[in-house]
Image (cartoon, rainbow, N blue to C red):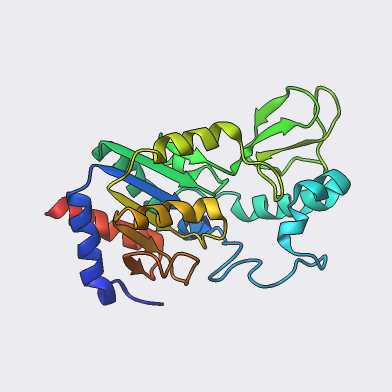
Amino acid sequence: MHALSEFDHEINQVADILKSSSDIFVVTGAGISADSGLPTYRGFGGLYDQKETEDGIPIEKALSGPMFESNPQLTWKYLAEIEEGARGAKHNRAHEVLAEMEQKFKRFWILTQNIDGFHTTAGSKNVIEIHGNMHRMICSQCPFNCIYADYSNFKMPPLCPDCSSMIRPDVVLFEEQLPPHQINVLYRETEKPFDLVISIGTTSYFPYIAEPIYQARQMGIPTVEINPGRTEVSGAVDIKLPLRAAETLNEIWHRYQSA
C-alpha cells in the first residue's frame, strides 16, 4: 500500500485546484466505505473479485432482477449477506469531508453507487443514490414501504405485512432500470460543467459512472481519481492517487483549509 508522503505533490495539486473551484462533482463507489469496515465487491480486495459465489454463479447474476423473479430466496441470501457485512458500520472521515465540502462550495454534488446511505448520514444533502438505499424496503405488489435499520429480524424471504407479497430493498438489482428521478437529477446537474470531477473508490465499471470523468476530460476540466487499484478511468484522469479514501480526502481538505 502506498503512503501519503509518496504523493505529496499530487495532493498539493488537488488542494490547489479546489482553491480555484466553485463547482465540484464527486463520484463514489464501495471503496469510500472501505474505511467503515465495509468490503468492496469488485476490484482491489473485493469480496467477489474475479470469483463466483458459493452457489457457483457470479454475484451479478445472484443479485439480478431476473434471479429475484425466478429465485427470490437466492437473491435474498446475498442481499442478507451484504447487509450483515455492513451491520453496525457507520460513515467515516471520507464521507464527513465531502459533507463539509458541500457547505463550502457554491455547487457540490455526489453521484454514488453505494446503497449504504453513509453520505446522507454524514450530512451531505446533494446526493444522487443511483442504485438506491438498502435500508429502504418496498413491497413488490402494494404501496408498502418502510425504513429498516437492519435485516436481523427478517424471515427469509421477507413478506409484506400489508399484503403478504414479497418485499425487497429499494435498490437497483443487476439488469434492472435505473430510477428515473435519480437519472433526471444526474442529467440536470451534469448539463452545466463543473470545475473539478473526482472519482473515489469505484472501479467505474458502469458507463454512467465513468462518463462524468470522460466528459470532463473532453472539456478540459481537471479530473482526479482516489483508488488503491487501477480502474476503467485510471488512464483518463489528470491526477491518480492510488490511496485509501479517508486519509487522502482528509489530507487534501486539511491542506485546502490551511492555505
Q: Quadrant of residue 192?
A: top left
Q: Is residue 259 left or right of residue 123?
A: left
Residue at 66% from the left image edge and 28% from the top image edge: 146
Residue at 47% from the left image edge and 71% from the top image edge: 229
Position of the N terminus by quadrant: bottom left
| Residue 216 appearing in the image | yes
Position of the C terminus by quadrant: bottom left
Q: Farthest residue toward the front?
A: 218
Residue 141: x %, y % from top left: 81, 27
Closer to us: 142 or 191 = 191
Residue 123: x %, y % from top left: 39, 37
Q: Quadrant of residue 119?
A: top left
Residue at 42% from the left image edge and 68% from the top image edge: 234
Residue 38: x %, y % from top left: 55, 58
- Is the residue 230 above or below the residue 224 in the image? below
Q: Farthest residue toward the left?
A: 259
Q: Is residue 210 left or right of residue 6?
A: right
| Residue 124 appearing in the image | no
Give the total number of marks visible in the rendering. 0
Q: Is residue 71 left or right of residue 205?
A: right
Q: Is residue 125 left or right of residue 76?
A: left
Residue 143: x %, y % from top left: 73, 22
Closer to us: 43 or 23 = 23
